[in-house]
Amino acid sequence: MSHEASHEVPNGAVTFIAVPSGGVPEPGKTLAYTNVDTINLETIPLNGGILVKAVIASPDPGQRAMMTPETPESKESMYPPFSPGKPIRGFSILQVLRSELEGVHVGDHIHAYVPLQNYVVLPNLNNGAVIESFNKDAQILWTAWVGVLGMPGQTAWIAWQEYSKAKKGEVAFVSSAAGPVGSLVVQLAKRDGLKVIASAGSPEKLAWLEELGADVVFNYKTENTLEVLKKEGPINVYWDNVGGETLSAALDAAAVGARFIECGMISTFTEGFVPVPNLWMIIPKCISLNGFIVTTHYPRYLTEFYKTVPALIASGELKYAETVYKGGFAEFDEAFIALLSGKTGNGKVVVVV
Amino acid sequence: MSHEASHEVPNGAVTFIAVPSGGVPEPGKTLAYTNVDTINLETIPLNGGILVKAVIASPDPGQRAMMTPETPESKESMYPPFSPGKPIRGFSILQVLRSELEGVHVGDHIHAYVPLQNYVVLPNLNNGAVIESFNKDAQILWTAWVGVLGMPGQTAWIAWQEYSKAKKGEVAFVSSAAGPVGSLVVQLAKRDGLKVIASAGSPEKLAWLEELGADVVFNYKTENTLEVLKKEGPINVYWDNVGGETLSAALDAAAVGARFIECGMISTFTEGFVPVPNLWMIIPKCISLNGFIVTTHYPRYLTEFYKTVPALIASGELKYAETVYKGGFAEFDEAFIALLSGKTGNGKVVVVV
């Protein structure tokens, strides 16, 4: 065994096994924590890039959309399907171990979309950012930086600015509102002076949404969404995290000129396709449906986000919640399944590596 | 019989009989030309408004959407359902017989949305316009003013400006392209430097679309829309006149960031609801679906439209076609049924009263 080889360390990863047969994966059948290879942290070449270690990993509903069969077309998409046998990817907080990249220093924390592996060499930050300077003295827990200050919070803050065209006195409806995206949307809508209707799936989540200022909260599992919206609407802005029947109800209860912010249609994966027979209503009601991927808006908004939102979190003006798994990558599968099943607490599900 | 009564004249109207049972009405079962009442043209009070006579009537697909059951909600909508026993409404060219309205003179031609009746008293122009001054010496046939220069042309021109965000070199797909809206969209897209794919339902229509400059034309009845779009796309702008399966194909063949201009979903009425199972694609592909009613954009665009488009028609830079029914209101039912069946020629179906 050579001297160099003695410095090789195992480099565990959250590995994609196979496309799940149902909407929610079964434990151990889609994801597994495996030692795919080893790495020599001192000698691995950086070629102008950086070597980082994983600090916080983030299970996100969007990852389910990448657990689909690979096709020639899907491979071309912005977020292509995961490849069986390889690490899945996700937004993460990483700490820099070595750097040949300008502006990135050893010890810096960064937010980036990377393979979920203990150690990764990155050629550049891609769409990521060094967040060290926005979190002086680490006053905000690093876990928040994949949640309210990471991709989910960026999604809420950026798309609300880009698409809501919110006017004081209007009515907003937020589905899946106790999640990390929805819970920030609720607060942003209140700050803009809207009446906010928020739905979630448990009494604990509804109680939290009331704390956040939602005017009307309801449990979509026990109440009829359309009836609530007809009574409390019509709605001017719909923040859609789910699609399907809820989208259909929102179209029915929409005001003329309503803006629909299409953040996710998780029901397509967890419940299968549910038709939207009143889609035609977008015409007489002059509704816009806006699909988006937040990272495409980073060039215009990300710097402003980091300059604005962390301060509002630090001061307590904006609130967040999180469900923390402390078992590292070995618990990622469990956390991801809990997330898709809606069986987690309020806010963001995070995994501390 | 009094002297006044001797001046009463019959005032025939296109009357709504009943909601059609199928998508396309049966002759005489939904619309009939009837003498609903009489009118005294000299003495009827105007109360500050105008008395007009119908010159050109316009069967439009949008009227089918108003041949639905009246409900408390639908009565509140911008274009409520027609009431059985009463005249239907439509965009029309009218000539002024008497006027108490400032800026409107006897003999003026106006474009307005009115009940389809030989004589009508209007309190104001509502969303209409005096078009006399835009058509000096009547150089453009008045029939064109309900087509390429009426609501359909305004729809094409205004929504293309508002929603297309067209960039030279992009690809546009226009369905139902040989109609009065689509045929102008094809030309506007070419003027903006796009590659244009256009679909229609007959060889004659396809030949005309080629004359208008479409780069790719295909018969949606004999060719597979998705295959054509995959070969000639991906598409950046989709002008949707039909909805259903065609919309689904357009989503499949859309480029990231595509803009869908949702002008109509006539398939919902003529073929019944066809699900759009890939609606979720608007998220990963960052697609916007923009429903609209053109009249809501009149305040911003209508004056510019009348200042710009008639000159382009008069000079021949923009082309149009029309299928003219010369039998007056008595032929409206026949013209409307032919329109919905796609059995008319190129361009706009008009009825000369």
Image (cartoon, coloured by chain):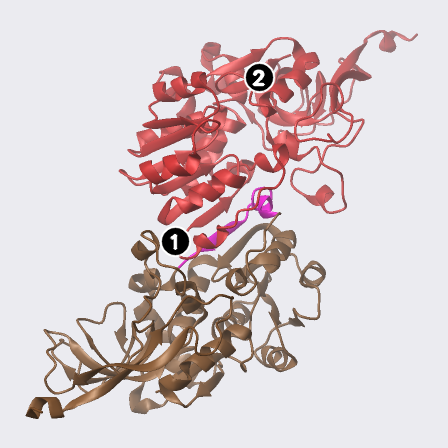
Chain colours: A brown, B red
User: Farthest residue toward the right?
Assistant: B1
Name the chain letter of the residue that bears numbered label 1: B
Give, as a three-letter code, the residue at label 2.
Answer: Val
Q: Secondary structure at mark 1?
A: loop
Horizontal and vertical percent for residue A301?
Answer: 34, 65
Give, as a three-letter code, the residue at label 1.
Answer: Lys
User: Farthest residue toward the left?
Assistant: A2
Q: CA distance from mark 2 to mark 1?
A: 40 Å
Q: Which mark is residue B350?
A: 2
Counting the numbered discs, the total is 2
Question: Residue A324: within the magenta?
Answer: no
Q: Quadrant of residue B268?
A: top right
Horizontal and vertical percent for residue A260?
Answer: 52, 56
A168 to A339, vertically: above or below = above
What segment is highlighted magenta in the picture?
A278-292
Seen in the image, is B91 located left or right of residue A161? right
Identify which residue, A4 or B55, lies in the foreground. Answer: A4
Q: Which residue is mark 1?
A: B285
- Location of the N terminus of chain A (image quadrant): bottom left
